[in-house]
Image: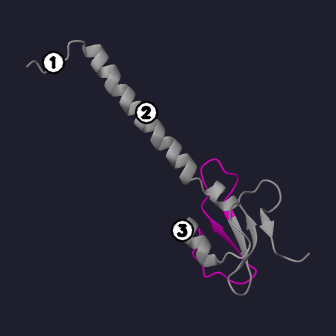
Amino acid sequence: MNATPSNPLRFWIKRFGILLVVFGCLVLFSIRYFNKISVCSRLKPGITLNDMIERFGSPIDNKAPEPGRWVFFKSTIGAAGPIRVKLDDQDRVVVLRCNEDGPPTWTLEQK
């Protein structure tokens, strides 16, 4: 048997097309499932600092969080600033900001 394809151009176009489809699927998967902003916007009030760390990794500032202090998490490329949370004295999130544009995503603080 001859291992050489009868039409080399068709052979390489077929292989390149398969790679292109696989690459496109991976890009769409990463946008859908690894977009921290969309994950952040779905968080509900009552979340704790440990829940945030579980979803977004360690805070950017590695100091021990204090009540009333803002804690920052890495955001996605192209987002306006980091994900920010303000904690109460029991490490519960009282203010969540998924980006720097506009008002907080939600707040439990009394004005």
Residue 68 screen position, x and y as percent: 76, 80
Visible in this render: residue 108? Answer: yes
| Badge number at residue 21 | 2
Left or right relative to 61: residue 29: left
> Mark 2 belongs to which amino acid?
Val
Query: Disc 3 and disc 2: Cα gap in Å?
Result: 31 Å
Left or right relative to 22: residue 44: right
Where is residue 43, by image quadrant? bottom right
Q: Which mark sits nearer the N-terminus, 1 or 3?
A: 1
Where is residue 95, by image quadrant? bottom right
Visible in this render: residue 58? Answer: no
Residue 74 screen position, x and y as percent: 60, 61
Which residue is the site of mark 1?
4
Q: Residue at x 70, y 66 (%)?
A: 84
> Mark 1 belongs to which amino acid?
Thr
Q: Residue at x 49, y 42 (%)?
A: 27
The region drawn magenta spans 57-83
Query: Disc 1 and disc 2: Cα gap in Å?
Result: 24 Å
> Mark 3 belongs to which amino acid?
Gly
| Badge number at residue 57 | 3
